[in-house]
Image (cartoon, rainbow, N blue to C red):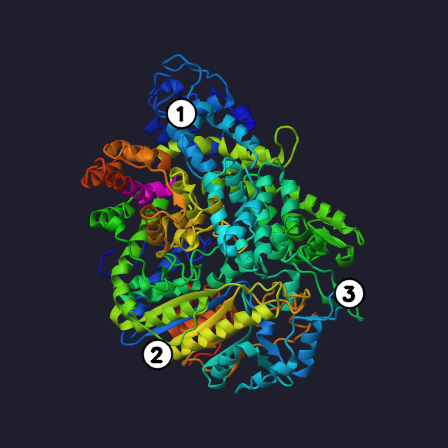
Amino acid sequence: MTNSSLSRRAFLNHSAAWGGMTAVAPWAMNLALTANAAAQVSNSDYKALVLVFLLGGNDHYNTIVPFDLDSYNAYAKVRTDPGAIDDGLNTIALARSTLTSHQLNPLNPWPSGRSFAMNPALAKLKSLFDTEKLALLMNVGSLSGPLTKANYLKGIDVPAKLFSHNDQTLTWVKGEINSKTGFGGRLADFISSQNEPNTVLSGINLNGGAFLGSSQGPGYRLGSSGAVPLTKFFNNDMVAATVKKLMLQSGSHYMHSAYVDLTAQAFNAVDVVNPPFLKSSVAGFPATPLGDQLKTIARMISCRNTLGVKRQVFYATLGGFDTHAGMPDNHNALLAQVADAMSAFYEATDDLGVADQVTTFTGSDFGRTLSSNGDGSDHGWGSFHMVMGGAVKGKRWYGGVPTIAVDGPDDVGSGRLLPSVSVDQYMSTLALWFGAPSSILDTIIPRIKRYNTSDLGFMR
Amino acid sequence: MQAIETECNPAATPPVRQETAALVFTSASILTACGGGGSEGGLIGGGTGEWNADGSSKNADIFFEQSAELATPMTVNTPTGVKYPKLMPRRSAARFLVQATFGVQGNDIDALCAKWRSRWIDEQFEIPPKSSHYDDVLRYQAQITTIEGSWDQHIWESYATAPDQLRKRVGFALSQIMVVSVQSLLGGGGDRALAGAAYFDWLEKGAFGNFRDLLNDVTLSPAMGWYLSTMNNNKALYNEANVAIRVPDENYAREVMQLFTIGTIELNIDGNPKNGVLKETYNNTDIQNLARVFTGWRADAMSLGIKRWNRPMIHDTNRHSPEEKKFLGVTIPAKTPGVESLKIALDTLFNHPNVGPFIGRQLIQRLVTSNPSPGYIERVARKFNDNGRGVRGDMRAVIKAILLDPEAISPLNIDKPRDEWGKLREPVLRFTQLLRMLEPTSKGPDGIWGITMANAGVTQHPGRAPSVFNFFDPNHSPAGTNIQTKALYAPEFQIASEVSVISVINYFASILNTNPPYLEFNYQRFVDMADKPVDLIATLNLILANESLAQPTVNLMVQTIELLPKPAVGNTNALLRVKVAILMVLASPEYLIQK
């Protein structure tokens, strides 16, 4: 590692992408392919992928809301406690009258008799949908492979630890709970050579997490005020220099060396990232946790030429979506924050002239139950997600439209949805757009060959 | 230490790895050490055979330490002829205080050296809390305008000054296993903050009680009731077609199993997957059934005012699910009353064979080391299962098993720590160590502290975990490091980032540079050493790092101090030297990895 660049450590001792897999050879062989493929990509362009992860399990039923009368009635009935016993009428369903002007009219029609509306809190994202900058992914979730309800009920090919927050979050962002690396990190490994010498900036975390974990580290963490420099302690240069020297003192213990590597990267970033980053500015972002993160990403993208980076994967997160209680008000407020931040981000990328080169997509631990506990909903599985950007074939829906019913054909209990399409396919569609050749797709998404298609078609 | 005594056979070859034995043992006469760790005994070992005049070993030996803890005369003679060492080595004492307290204060080390660990622990078991978190936060709320500030200022003061350090340290560990994020309650106003404070009181009560009672208190805490939405959780409601149009909230039912008691995978007593197979402990049907148990609970009577936040939730029969509840192979018949249902459910969880290894491992991780050997986990789990007198869940026995285990007390783990040994010090404990060492006193009204905004500065804060999954996952292993390559865990790395590694040092420097409002630090004993940099660094190396700083590091620190202006009467040079010395130790990675 030099002081003038943020370089990833050399590829060392690659083990299999999956924790439990012992076959090292195919992974190493594919890495060689990876390097060749990367070299063929033009260096005159820029692309970024931005995952906005809604921590806690977003209530998709209150995000993209069933609107045709039959579906709406099924939704509202299950989500409304008539108050026969206690506190009077209590509903977590959105009133249909508030949804009328938020109906979604996609270019590819909904299945016969079906329709959906966006939560009114997402009005700014509906505008992007209407202008073909945003698409919907219907009923996507983590799978081990194609899965029928019959096989689910028999326990065949069911993903491990369904409905558990941390396990399903790890599954969502890594592909498997015990995988050493994340989807984004494997993608970052693949493209990092295009970012020489600042390869560390291939995967950037705004708030931590496992999505960008790679053979090179957990992903670079960028704060909203750039890299944090060391204070000039007690106004004494010698003291500050010694403290820095001590912080970088090498040691053989694994925890010691891992901590020092992290510290070294932090110091290098002060020299590399801060000069352009601190001069950058972007306008129009709300002062919210997610707004700050997406603003920081936009500022980083504005530095792409100075930093010489061509491909970047970003990971932003927003907590609070585990809405067992306080529905629908708390959830509506969270969605408004998402819509304000994401729409501001789209505008910022447009201002920077990279709207077609930056794709933002949402993820979450899981969807939720259709059933209500009177004040909220519970952990589910399949969910509805959004993909935003100029390269998205927008104003369309992809995946499968589920029947809205407890005990319906897509329900595996209390309205938990059996996913129609997998997170693997969601990721692979984005990876292909990002430039991953289909020949090496399975190094990034190891199960992708189990599906009949690796491209769900939502990217141009 | 029943397990060790029974497993110990002094005649047998000690279970010490060859390479470590060769490095450390210089005296064959003390090779009778026994670790009781079976094949995991590689982490334990012996001393160098150097002796002080009083009979203590200069470089402690595990056998001596165990002999002393057990008050069992040794079977070999020391060079001075005593049967067991009189004084605990200071380095061992300093390390123990890191495991069992929030840091060394005043003469803590000397006091412990005279007592050894076991007696110190017994004394700590009997020290009552000076005051409750509930009362203190209430007092702070009267003094300080923000609800947030009342919690923050109180909790740092409590951890840094309370005499019942072991209780609070274990309570802090439990607050990271049975998580209520007080942070999420603070936004809900003063009442919720009080419930959060009471929750910490109840955890500390449970720390020295029985795990079964702790589980009951955690379940019925109003803070938990808010946090995992058991409060006002209602039975199912069915429509005319007998379809449920409202179902019980499954939040607590899931997390009490996944995080607070048994975990997701069936375990052997040593913490490994049972029979080597990843078999899930429960499925969603178990959760839906258990969720029915946790219906009907609500806050105590309004007439109690704020006091109801310091009382368990009460049961409302009308809201309790009357249906049959089947989970984990147990059936609670339909129409069983709610209080009885809860007792059966919590008994079932408490008696599950996973609890000992699942909770034991995490307590070891919070107090001692990130990667305890299977043998260490098993020794602790066996104490959980039976304290030696037929009692399951005796937390005092569990704490002793954790803190007196050969792995926890082995001096080898300071001298030649293997890569699986030790843990990254979490920022909260780094900050409390600093605070305790500096013996803060308040000049503020009613003795309040002025520590605010510590969350951003320290980068971690008691009671402010972002979710029920704590600040970090017990199974976290940082990507792209040797830690991960070797399949080791390092939970605290989950909150270490390019942002935090530098900003926390800047924060500590700012605390040293400018006292927080109202606080006065006592630097005097260090100021007295300012013209003797070798002594100054040696003292800090002992207090903060249990002498785990290597000689080149110590030399660099001493040289740096010598380059600073010389102390003289009437100037502040001495204080500057002291502050720089403290900051250097706090920033050193050799200190940062607790060994």
Give the percent coordinates (x, y) of residue A122. 52, 77
Q: Are marks 2 and 1 in contact (CB under 8 Å)?
A: no
Mark 3 chain: A
Magenta stretch secondary structure, dominant:
helix
Residue A354: mark in rendering: 2
What's the amino acid at mark 3? Ile
Residue denoted by label 1: B61
Q: Is residue A419 visible?
A: no
The vertical placement of A111 against A320, above or below, is below
Residue found at x 35% / y 68%: A312
Which residue range is magenta in the image?
B579-595
Mark 2 chain: A
The quadrant the C terminus of chain B occupies is top left
In the visual, does B132 lie left or right of A428? right
Residue denoted by label 3: A85
What's the amino acid at mark 1? Asp
Label 3 to label 2: alpha-carbon separation: 56 Å
Label 1 to label 3: alpha-carbon separation: 68 Å
In the visual, does B452 lie left or right of B564? right
Mark 1 chain: B
